[in-house]
């Protein structure tokens, strides 16, 4: 039953992938909104919820087809930042970003490809910061509300809505669908005259935002100021003495998104649509944007001498470079044409290489940054295969041409079979070749491990009856040429 369930889950995932791979955007903003829904769908798949993931995949297709609504004249501007921002509570990295009033307090925003940034100066005569996760709202701090698709009307918060809370002690939590957890946001606190300053970086990876120039989302801010209050009985109790909203909508912010103000992203990249560029001079295929697959890459390159598809997967004669903050889905095995120059997969900052299943990369290497960017919904393996040369010699040290051999390699660690070749023919010089995993990289949605292969290899020659198998050690990550000498019983 468990095996049948796993197969069913895989079929459901494939349905989601087919929808997401077939997005046809009306414009760049619509595609960015579709990518938000895609991010939610992938998150649901990670959690094992294939049915809800398909719903979000279909929403992605709907938003891709829908033309973007006109920009709001009343939206607050959030300007793109090219310079790096140190989260230290200081204003030095904020350039000419404008302040916006929040009652007696004030704030400003900016963004880059990694984070949404908020700098807030909060007036508070007595700072109370004893609250902890998941009740940071019970102390002084700032709440930030986000609705990623800028949806209008009265609606309950759902997968697209976030309630962040940042305490005056520098702690951070995020609530979504009534579930609260510690946020991965970075926070710095600095005391100022009659209050404190908060500098905040909310990562897009956590908020699932797909930001580009012109993108609008709904948001609201709320300053919580706690202090001692006197109740009608004359007793002093700790309570909220000042509750300041950017916009008071007349409804509870954590239950209804009605009337939230708009935040418009200004500057930065113009599109998230996948783009594929081939440079013959650099012998490199570069992937930009989000949602690219190997099949799409082959169509865009449109040159079978550089990249082609067949029943065994992809045959390629170029390096692959995944640009900064782009992603690529590996959906099949990849083989290098191997002209002696070496073939690499490289990846830029913030990029992601998604594994749709176990795959082999023959005579290709993953650069360190590409290995770090590997991501998968489950425990998925990438095998870096190497061609191994084997020269077959007789007992007098002479090559044995045209000989037929069988070969089996077992992992030294657990004795499991890693590769098996029932029939390999040596050429005129007695040389045969086979492929073996030099390294196996295992990846999931949060971690990667690498293990280099060491194999006990058993070689038998079918034309030499009565000979005992010859056993030896093969380590493809260190050596790719070996010799087998029949009659002496050794393999080196």
Image (tube, grey):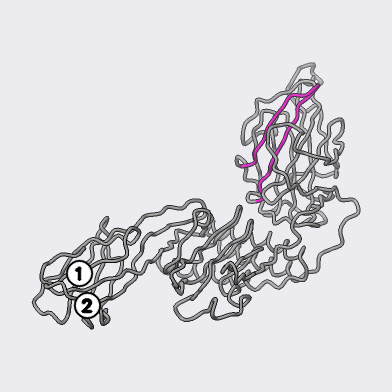
Q: Which quadrant holds residue 89?
A: top right
How crowded is the residue under tag 1: few (<14 C-alpha within 10 Å), some, or many (20+)?
many
Q: Which quadrant holds residue 353?
A: bottom right
* Residue bearing the label numbered 1: 484
Question: Residue 318 at what x, y percent from top left?
Answer: 53, 70
Residue 152 highlighted magenta (yes or no): no
Residue at 32 percent of width and 72 percent of height: 434
Question: Residue 259 at what x, y percent from top left?
Answer: 85, 50
CA gap, disc 2 to disc 1? Answer: 11 Å
Residue 78 sits above or below residue 348 on the image: above
Determine whether label 2 and label 1 are within 8 Å by CB. yes
Q: Quadrant of the C terminus?
A: bottom left
Secondary-structure class at tag 2: strand
Secondary-structure class at tag 1: strand
In the image, which disc is placed on residue 405?
2
Residue 115 visible from this viewpoint:
yes
Segment colored magenta: 184-204
Q: Is residue 340 left or right of residue 478?
A: right
Residue 188 highlighted magenta (yes or no): yes
């Amino acid at each position: 039953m468990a095996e049948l369930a796993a197969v069913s889950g895989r079929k459901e995932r494939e349905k989601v992938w087919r929808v997401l791979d077939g997005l046809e955007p009306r414009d760049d903003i619509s595609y960015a909104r579709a990518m938000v829904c895609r991010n939610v769908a992938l998150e649901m798949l990670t959690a094992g919820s294939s049915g809800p993931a398909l719903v979000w995949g279909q929403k992605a297709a709907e938003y891709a087809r829908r033309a973007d609504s006109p920009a709001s004249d009343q939206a607050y501007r959030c300007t793109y930042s090219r310079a790096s921002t140190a989260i230290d509570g200081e204003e030095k990295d904020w350039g000419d970003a404008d302040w916006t009033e929040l009652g007696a307090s004030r704030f400003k925003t900016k963004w880059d490809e990694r984070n949404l940034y908020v700098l807030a100066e909060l007036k508070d005569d007595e700072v109370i910061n004893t609250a902890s996760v998941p009740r940071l709202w019970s102390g002084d701090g700032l709440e930030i509300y986000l609705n990623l698709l800028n949806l209008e009307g009265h609606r309950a918060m759902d997968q697209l809505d976030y309630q962040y809370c940042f305490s005056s002690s520098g702690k951070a939590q995020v609530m979504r669908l009534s579930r609260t957890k510690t946020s991965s946001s970075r926070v710095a606190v600095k005391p100022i005259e009659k209050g404190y300053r908060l500098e905040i970086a909310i990562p897009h990876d956590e908020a699932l935002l797909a930001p580009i120039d012109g993108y609008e989302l709904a948001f609201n801010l709320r300053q919580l100021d706690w202090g001692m209050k006197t109740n009608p009985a004359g007793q002093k109790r700790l309570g909220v003495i000042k509750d300041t909203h950017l916009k008071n909508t007349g409804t509870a912010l954590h239950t209804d998104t009605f009337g939230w103000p708009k935040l418009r992203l200004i500057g930065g990249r113009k599109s998230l649509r996948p783009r594929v560029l081939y440079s013959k001079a650099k012998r490199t295929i570069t992937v930009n944007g989000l949602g690219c697959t190997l099949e799409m890459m082959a169509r865009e390159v449109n040159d079978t001498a550089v990249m082609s598809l067949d029943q065994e997967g992809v045959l390629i004669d170029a390096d692959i470079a995944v640009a900064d903050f782009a992603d690529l889905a590996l959906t099949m095995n990849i083989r290098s044409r191997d002209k002696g120059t070496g073939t690499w997969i490289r990846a830029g900052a913030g990029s992601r290489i998604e594994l749709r299943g176990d795959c082999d990369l023959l005579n290709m290497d993953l650069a360190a940054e590409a290995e770090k960017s590997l991501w998968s919904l489950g425990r998925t393996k990438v095998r870096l295969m190497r061609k191994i040369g084997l020269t077959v010699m007789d007992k007098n040290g002479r090559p044995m041409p045209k000989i037929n051999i069988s070969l089996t390699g077992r992992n030294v660690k657990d004795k499991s079979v890693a590769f098996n070749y029932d029939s390999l023919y040596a050429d005129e010089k007695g040389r045969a070749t086979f492929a073996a995993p030099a390294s196996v990289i295992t990846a999931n949605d949060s971690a990667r491990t690498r293990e280099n292969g060491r194999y006990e290899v058993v070689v038998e020659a079918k034309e030499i009856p009565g000979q005992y198998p010859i056993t030896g050690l093969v380590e493809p990550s260190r050596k790719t040429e070996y010799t087998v000498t029949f009659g002496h019983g050794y393999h080196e």
